Image (cartoon, grey):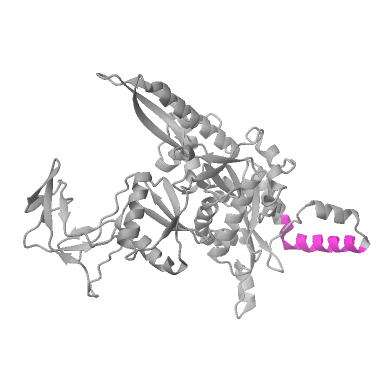
Amino acid sequence: VLSGVLRSKDFEYFCFGPKYRYSPNKQRRGLPARSLRLYILMGSSYVRVNSVPAGHFCAIHGLEDLQLKTVTLCSSPSGMPLKVINRGIRPLVKVNVEAKSASDTAILERGLAKLSLADAAVEVTATAKGERILACLGELHLEQSILDLQNVYCGEKIELRISKQIVEFGESTAWFENEVTDFEQFYNLQSPPLRQTLIPPYCYEDGLSQARNGRSRAVISNKAVAIHVRVVPLARPLYNCLLQRPIVEKCDEDLVLMTKALNIEVGDRNPEHIFNELLSLVVSVDNTGNAMVQSRGMSGGSCIKGVVSKNGEVYVPPAVTKRSEERHEVSNNDDTENVQDYSRESEASGKREYLDIRTCISSRVQAVEKSKVNESACQVWSELKGSCTAGFQAGCSSGPLCEEPVRGVLVVLEGAEITLCRETDKEKHESNADGRYSLSKAVSGGMIVASLKTGIRSSLLSRPVRLVEGYLRLTLHSSLTGLGPLYAILSKRRGRVISDTMVDGTDLISIDARLPQSESF
């Protein structure tokens, strides 16, 4: 009980779900209002009481038919539901549930929806492949949830097909050898492509032709905007600092390493000043160890270029592949003329801005070129910037290797090229005199999301990628006689003992260990 006094005699309470919103102009028909019976828990027994004041726990009888994760009880219909308490526990055991008979699929979906509402610790998700994933806290919880699904929530006795337990992995990346030593040299480094970018199916990844050394140039579908994206590793201590905002001593080395990788001058400044500068560049931080920042050039406007082109498209350099090289070797004079015409058209479509923005990204001194075109481009980017957060979340939801979630990655927005044209009014001489520019083509938020997702995936694939395995932290108790077999089981399942101490007053040993999640079943 959080406020007031909860009574059980001659009182009726309204039951609010998590999505309840009160509207004074609209009558709420069917809003549950009922009388309750209250009990105080005394050991293994229940003692019925008439009222419970605020600050006490109690058991409530009369809410069995409400299939909701959380319910707020209020004596007035004009109240509001309380926010769900985050328990800090996430489901670990996942299985795929499907009906043996295709005709029972609708019944199964209704049952899963009721189960997810009734049990706050259960998560039900549907994948793009049509799978229905049921996630629970443990094996016993999973077994009980499946029994409740069959006997209670489906309403009818249906046969289910349960898959083996699904283990979630993650995808991450590592540093290049010379990535932190010299920013400009690494940016212009012409290194051979990594092996994973040359073998199928990874060589067919969208945008891979424009990706190199962890950087990618994501061009939207109508070629009106191009975003320069970079992906670097993000250490867990530094991520915790970005998430919680205060800096800790353990992340000083990671902070200096990150500032060198982002071309931020360290000098004699203390870690707090460096962290505050990095914090000012943060755009978004998710809950899975990833973050997105913008470069100093993007925040200052020097790496946002406006392109005034006739065809309304940004410059797209031709991708250099083995097939194109072979074609250039056997090309004749006609092909050479076509290549020259293509290059001239590309130069007219923003090649100069493309080279300028590369120079701005690689240099530490950020000089802002003041012009009406670039000022208009900055205004347009401020409107499109909101869609980058959704693109960041979509890009980190599934990696390019195994479509697993991305962990421990920092996405850097290094620059943007935006095609513009003069605004056309009825009187053209007035618009030309004002010098105002607008987007040459219509750009939606979905285009930005799709292109940024492609840029993040292709940037990850052009770096040294890593698969991340989840570990469980265990606290075990054993006697001296059972210590040997326990260590043998942990070693067989690739476990690692962190510490072991004697429990005072007993002959038991408390063992703190880590075990891979895939070996825990």
Q: How many marks?
A: 0
Q: Position of residue 12 (x, y in %)?
A: 12, 64
- Classify residue 148 as left or right of residue 317: left
Quarter of the rendering occupied by the C terminus: top left
Q: Quadrant of residue 250?
A: top left
**In x, y percent, where is residue 37?**
11, 56
Regarding residue 115, the answer to whether it shows in the image is: no
> Taking 163 as reference, is 221 above or below it?
below
Name the side, left or right, on which 29 lies relative to 169. left
Q: Nearer the viewer, residue 179 or 35?
A: 35
Q: Residue furthest bottom?
A: 426
Magenta stretch, overall SS: helix
Q: Position of residue 84 (x, y in %)?
A: 30, 53
Towards the viewer: 381 or 22: 22
Residue under the point 47% across and 67% down: 102
Image coordinates of residue 308 in percent, x first then y, are 68, 64
> What stretch of residues is rendered in magenta?
334-352
* Left or right of 11 on screen, residue 369: right
Residue found at the far right of this picture: 333
Question: Which one is in front, 332 or 385?
Answer: 332
The residue that appears at 31% across and 54% down in the rendered structure is 119
Residue 345 falls within the magenta-colored stretch:
yes
Please state if 344 lies on the left or on the right of 131 as rendered: right
> With respect to residue 4, does 500 lie above or below?
above
**Residue 300 appears anywhere in the view:** yes
Q: Quadrant of residue 477?
A: top left
The residue lying toward the viewer, choosing from 429 and 162, is 162
Answer above or below: position of 240 versus 204. Answer: above
User: For residue 503: magenta?
Assistant: no
